[in-house]
Amino acid sequence: NAGVTQTPKFQVLKTGQSMTLQCAQDMNHNSMYWYRQDPGMGLRLIYYSASEGTTDKGEVPNGYNVSRLNKREFSLRLESAAPSQTSVYFCASSEGLAAAYEQYFGPGTRLTVT
Amino acid sequence: AQKITQTQPGMFVQEKEAVTLDCTYDTSDQSYGLFWYKQPSSGEMIFLIYQGSYDEQNATEGRYSLNFQKARKSANLVISASQLGDSAMYFCAMRDPSSGSARQLTFGSGTQLTVLP
């Protein structure tokens, strides 16, 4: 059971370049999330998708876009990367948005923008 | 204001001993969920334990238990019989309605636990 998978695991970009981070889950979860983790900090929500066909902004959405391609897949796009976006990016999924549902995380993507 | 506060940036514990990691939270809602996650040096986030605000009993999962004191708004993680593999960063997190419709997880800053042989 793969759970939540993310690609790539590592990426180096130059300022201004674009890229898409891919995420897929095989747990038939309705809700999916993208977080970023900066050094010495907890995770902060970038965007989320409550269910297939919907997306919404989280705490730190500026500079990002997302696509909920289908129930399994949720991608994060950086249109013009900036050094401030150097971070570790985590995708997560849960059965739904209710407070009781734990979120399952992917292994993360370590992104460096030079 | 901080919604989740973890006051111990680092903790040390001797192997086979128990250790308590502190977490206090701030919410005015009656319905919320508290979570603990483990992040080893490899970087993945591993779900450990969940406590609902209406749960009367403290949650337990194997060697993990959550000391839930609702009136004090604390949700401390207790790890019994520590093992070397428990060395990791531990995050306390909360989901509550005031997080917005996302009911996103709000994380604390984490506690780095080191288990000594």
Image (spheres, coloured by chain):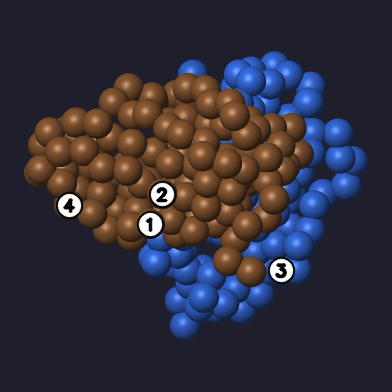
Chain colours: A brown, B blue
Eye-nearest disc, 4 or 2:
2
Instruction: List the residue tagged with mark 1.
Output: A7
| Between discs 1 and 4, the one toward the N terminus | 1
Q: Give the alpha-carbon distance from disc 1 to disc 3, as whole Å.
A: 33 Å
In the displayed orientation, state which residue is furthest to the bottom: B117
Label 1 or label 4, whichever lies nearer to me, is 1
Report the amino acid beneath label 1. Thr
Secondary structure at numbered mark 3:
loop
- For the residues beneath circles 4 and 3, the answer to whether they share a chain is no
Which residue lies most toward the front here? A70
Question: In the displayed structure, would residue A86 be above or below residue A63?
Answer: below
- Disc nearer the start of the sequence (1/2): 1
On residue B5, which mark appears?
none
Q: Is B23 in front, or is A10?
A: A10
In the displayed structure image, the side of residue B1 where residue A85 appears, left or right:
left
Q: Nearer the viewer, residue B110 or B45?
A: B45
The amino acid type, in three-letter code, at marker 2 is: Gln
The verdict on a common chain for dots 3 and 2 is no
Q: What residue type is labelled 4?
A: Val
Mark 3 or mark 2, whichever is nearer to me: 2
Q: How far apart are the two marked residues, 3 and 2, measured between alpha carbons?
A: 34 Å
Q: Is disc 1 in contact with disc 2, using a CB cutoff of under 8 Å? A: yes
Marks 1/3 in contact by CB < 8 Å: the verdict is no
Q: Residue B63 carries which label?
A: 3
Mark 1 falls within which chain? A
Q: Mark 1 or mark 3: which is in front?
A: 1
Q: Name the residue under label 2.
A: A22
**Residues at marks 4 and 3 touching, judged by CB atoms closer than 8 Å:** no
x, y percent for residue B102 = 60, 26
Q: How far apart are marks 4 and 3 (CA)?
A: 39 Å
